[in-house]
Amino acid sequence: MLEHTNKNRNRKRKIKIGFGTLLVLTIFVLCYIIAVEDKGSRKRSEESANTDRTMEKAPSAPETTTKERKEAAELTMDMAKTALDSFLSSFYIIEEKGGYIAGEDFWQQAEIFEIVIDTYERTGDAAYLALIDEMYRGFLAKHGEDWSYNDFNDDIMWMTIGCARAYEATKDTKYLTMAEKHFNIVFDRAWSEDLGGGLFWKTENKTKNSCINAPAVIAACLLGKASGNEKYYDKAVKIYQWEKENLFGPTGAVFDAYDLETGINQWCSTYNQGTFIGAATLLYQYYGEEAYLQDAKLAADYTVNTMFSGQVMNTEGEGNDLPGFKGILARWMGKFVRECGEEQYADWLRQNARTAWNNRNSKGIMWTQFNTKTGDAFYSAWGCSAAVSMLINCPYEIE
């Protein structure tokens, strides 16, 4: 009897425990269902709110994007002008007879003179017209009005280009007179039928270099446009054809020089690539012949993809001449992109300009090795001018 009673008690305890567990489980399931429903409801509400916000903003999105791009473009030009101002603050000297760049000689002065012309052309700011005149007077004060004493034909041709461009910017005939005078001096003393034509680099007449021939094509095209005299274009074509046949490789490499005794020096540099692109661009713009456009593209492709593998330029930091070369490339490749619509090179130019700017020193100076932080030690003006030219001449997303 006692044993039976205990069994009944145990059965009742088990039944009670089973019922309590069932009740707890039921409550838990109900809570879970409510929580899930609530979460789903909140999610649907959030999605609905986001959709409403998106629909409300959609009409104004294109306007905002355009405004942001415009502001970015204006900032880039402001950066370029700031870069030039910083450069001039560090290296430009003004005297009674004019202004000049400290520590630099004939051809470097001429090329930095061109950077100021670049800036005027791109901004239309009349303040740069006064600077063009001041620098020109400073150049004449140091080098006179007859440059034939200079044995380097390319030196004279660089300033000839500068004067032709200064005439284009100002319409002051003093620049055109000097440009025509010195183009003719160089052509008459440098052209020969040795090696089938071409211009000699120096008066010693040993090598015919790209650094005189392509700039001479550029100068001739500028003078042809300025004077209306077709003979300059005839000479431009004559010089260009010789350089293309002798110093332009099938891959787009522009070779350095053709020596009368040792043959072709196949070394490539940024300024020779740049002036060849510039020469081809100007001839294409005048004649409209597709061959010139293809030549410029081939040279640009070689520069970007073979010489630098699409990366930022971080070379040419040695010696007296090399450090400023990239500024010449920037000028003529920038013109090619902007005026011929060859946008495939635009991002690479902007990448170089942006990197140089980000690596400026505390004075706003940028050394020619764009991918290396510029220190606060002494640098040559010429070597620091390349980055300024890159910033001035790079094609902005909104022109």
Image (cartoon, rainbow, N blue to C red):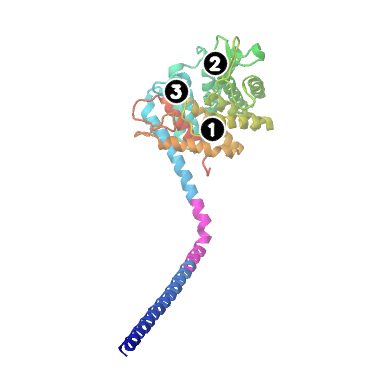
Residue 263 makes an appearance in the image? yes
Give the residues drawn in magenta, as a range. Answer: 48-67
Most common secondary structure along the magenta stretch: helix
| Residue type, numbered disc 2 | Asn
Q: Position of residue 344 (x, y in %)?
A: 58, 39
**Of callouts 1 and 3, the N-terminal one:** 3
Q: Which residue occupies 59% across, 37% down? A: 339
Give the image location of residue 142, x and y in percent.
43, 17
- In the image, 285 versus 41, the foreground residue is 41
- Numbered disc in front, either 1 or 3: 1
Q: Residue at x 56, y 26 (%)?
A: 273
Classify mark 3: residues with Cα within 10 Å, few (<14), some (14-19) or many (20+). some
**Residue 309 numbered mark, or none:** 1
The mark closer to the camera, 3 or 2, is: 2
Q: Which residue is mark 3?
A: 137
Q: Position of residue 209 (x, y in %)?
A: 57, 17
Amino acid carrying mark 3 in the image: Arg
Along the line of sight, the residue nearer the viewer: 109 or 244: 244
Q: Amino acid at mark 1?
A: Ser
Asked whether disc 2 touches disc 1, contact meaning CB atoms under 8 Å apart, the reply is: no
Mark 2 lies on a secondary structure that is helix
For mark 2, what is the residue?
153
Query: What separation in Å lies between label 3 and label 2 (alpha carbons)?
Result: 22 Å
Residue found 56% across the figure and 32% down from its top = 305
- Tell me the mark number nearer the camera, choosing from 2 and 1: 1
> In front: 307, or 72?
307
Q: Residue 65 lies in magenta, yes or no? A: yes
Q: How far apart are the alpha carbons under marks 1 and 3?
A: 42 Å
- Mark 1 residue element: loop
- Residue 290 versus residue 54 in the image, above or below: above
